[in-house]
Image (cartoon, rainbow, N blue to C red):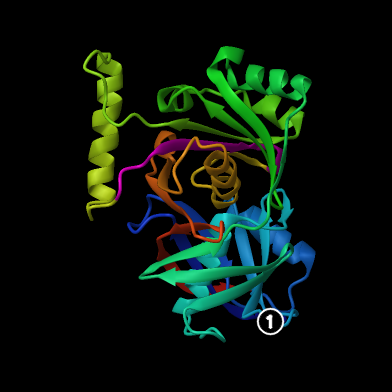
Amino acid sequence: MNAMTSRPFKQVDVFTAVPYYGNPLAVVLDGDGLDDEQMQRFARWTNLSETTFLLPPTLPGADYRVRIFTPGGELPFAGHPTLGSCHAWLEAGHQPKAAGRIVQQSAVGLVEIRRDGDRLAFAAPPMRRSAPSPTLLAKMAAALGLKASQIVSAQMLDNGPAWLGLLLADSDTVLALKPDHRMLRELGQKVGVAGLLPVEASSSSTSSMKSSLIGRSNREARAFGRGEEAPGVEVRAFAAPIGVEEDPVTGSFNASLAQWLIAEGHLPERYVAAQGQTLGRAGRVHIARDADGQVWVGGDSVTCVDGRLMR
């Protein structure tokens, strides 16, 4: 029998400071020597929304290179793999070329990551947006069980991964969605939805809404009892075409969503997005647009599994 190669491996929970409340990521810290098929097979085996493989950089200025795989294929860029891979790389003892600034090479090019205390944030890559076709919008609404009147605005958003972004009337509409994932898979288009959270619940709220808010409050108290800023928007992301029915917390979509909604005045230049509640998670994505107009997408990460991969 051939001797098996042992590779350092971590499983990291991203967009949470408390294990098992965010979006898990598998990170192979030494992907050197693995071919595309081996990487894809391992990503299918982990069955997580993304698995990353870290490699020596090939572009000047990069600290390391990352390849990102879903169970269904490779991605040019994704947000939670960017933060989680950087967290794992730093935790493994690596040092960036420039203090306080890490440069990750991915298929979309160089992505800058900065440290904000214990939290990491990546610079949202350039995003292209356009109006979706009326036909796609109508079919997507049907797949999500939405009426046209419930969609406030819609845009095609592309920062590497392409998303159809929908702004809905409110956060409760977002949480109540029960998508037809078969229809979404046939449409071949990932879709993300967002709804603004009210400052406080109305006194005329129904008992079911009150129960939802109480459950949300209790979950946040357990997972985020550090005086965190209250979320301003509720987000869900559906990616059946790449084998992920619903993503727990999605950095790439939140990045393009922020660029869109801040530009159109729907959200302030600094806010927190909540995602994952319907999956029993309590993800938090910290958004900030700086004086130069650059949007930064930040979040906490915590290592849940630390060991070695035998391959």
- Seen in the picture, residue 210 relative to 53 is either above or below; the reply is above
- Seen in the picture, residue 10 relative to 269 is either above or below; the reply is below
- Seen in the picture, residue 277 relative to 304 is either above or below; the reply is above
Asked if the stretch drawn in magenta spans residue 231, the answer is yes
Question: Left or right: 227 with respect to 66?
Answer: left
Q: Quadrant of the C terminus?
A: bottom right
Q: Quadrant of residue 19?
A: bottom left
Q: Position of residue 106 (x, y in %)?
A: 69, 67
Question: Left or right: 270 with respect to 123?
Answer: left
Q: Quadrant of the N terminus?
A: bottom right
Span highlighted in magenta in the image: 229-242
User: Which residue is disc 1 drawn over?
Assistant: 56
Q: Position of residue 100 (x, y in %)?
A: 47, 79
Q: Position of residue 25 (x, y in %)?
A: 53, 59
Q: Nearer the viewer, residue 45 or 93?
A: 93
- At label 1, the amino acid type is Pro
Q: Quadrant of residue 57?
A: bottom right
Asked if the stretch drawn in magenta spans residue 185, the answer is no
Q: Nearer the viewer, residue 302 or 15?
A: 15
Question: Left or right: 142 with respect to 262?
Answer: right
Residue at 57% across / 72% down in the picture?
309
Residue at 73% across / 73% down in the picture?
34
